[in-house]
Image (cartoon, rainbow, N blue to C red):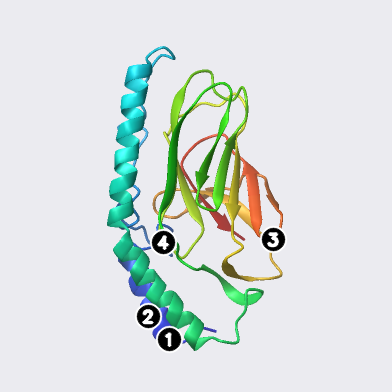
Amino acid sequence: MWSDRLLRKLNIVLLTGALALGIGCGVDDSTTGISDRSAADEQMPQLSASDNRALNEFLNSERARIREAQKATREVRDSLRRVWKQFKKDHPHVNRRNSPFPICEPEDYQAETKIIGPEGGTINMGRHRLIIPRGALEENTVITGEAPVSLLIEVQLSPHGTVFLQQPKLQLDYSHCFLPSDYQYRVAYINNGGHILEFPVSVDKGGIVEALIWHFSRYAVAY
């Protein structure tokens, strides 16, 4: 089990918003680099497939937002890495197969934004992937995937309200985490406060769990 001192440190990180998945409370997204998007005011403009100029302007604005988020989250990343180093120092006997907690080494904020159309495509978020099959979208759409700085495994996909004709596949990689070995892991659809809304049908492949999803928002690995 973890020491009281480390647990206090983790609680401080949670309360300051370093984790987007709160334990018993919601957190502000500003520290993770992911803005609090709502279906009402943060959707991609409703554009026709022929409006390439407006589509590219929106793509460039997403790229600019990602660059700013990369800068803003470095301090959070460094703070979480200090907690991570202390955990490994205090628990040298714990390995990746017998830890009772699904805690992961914090990594850099990772994101990608692309124009994806009826031909389909892939969004890479560091070690995580969103695969949109051919025929899933009727027209060109700016798709953004983000993996925040966190001790947990989580991503945010946007724009909200995107309608798919076929289900995209979401792959979340948990191979870098300290996890109980006797659990089956699955993808959870969560809200901004970290509360689980539903569990899409998932397949745990050992190190990677994948699920077919219908809508965009936040997803995380749970058990």
- 3 and 2 marks in contact (CB < 8 Å): no
**Residue for badge 2:** 8
Label 3 to label 2, Cα distance in Å? 28 Å
Image coordinates of residue 47 in percent, x first then y, are 38, 17
- Disc on res. 22: 4
| Residue count near mark 1 (Cα–Cα under 10 Å), binned few <14, some 14–19, many ≥20 | few
Instruction: Give the residue pinned by disc 1.
Output: 4
> Which residue is at the far top?
50
Residue 65 picture quarter: top left
Between 60 and 173, which is closer to the camera in this rendering?
A: 60
Dot 1 or dot 3, earlier in sequence:
1
First-in-chain label (2 vs 4): 2
Q: Secondary structure at mark 2?
A: helix
Label 1 to label 3: alpha-carbon separation: 28 Å
Expressed as whole percent of the image width and height from the top left, the position of residue 97 reads: 66, 74
User: Callout 2 environment at 10 Å: few (<14), some (14 to 19), or many (20+)?
Assistant: few
* Kind of residue sitting beneath label 1: Asp
Residue bearing mark 3: 184
**Viewer-proximal residue, 102 or 146?**
146
Circle 3 crowding by C-alpha within 10 Å: few under 14, some 14–19, many from 20: some
Where is the C terminus found, in terms of image quarters? Answer: bottom right
Image position, residue 2 (x, y; %): 50, 83
Q: Are marks 1 and 2 in contact (CB under 8 Å)?
A: yes
167 to 125, vertically: above or below: above
| Residue in the image at 56% along x and 41% along y | 130
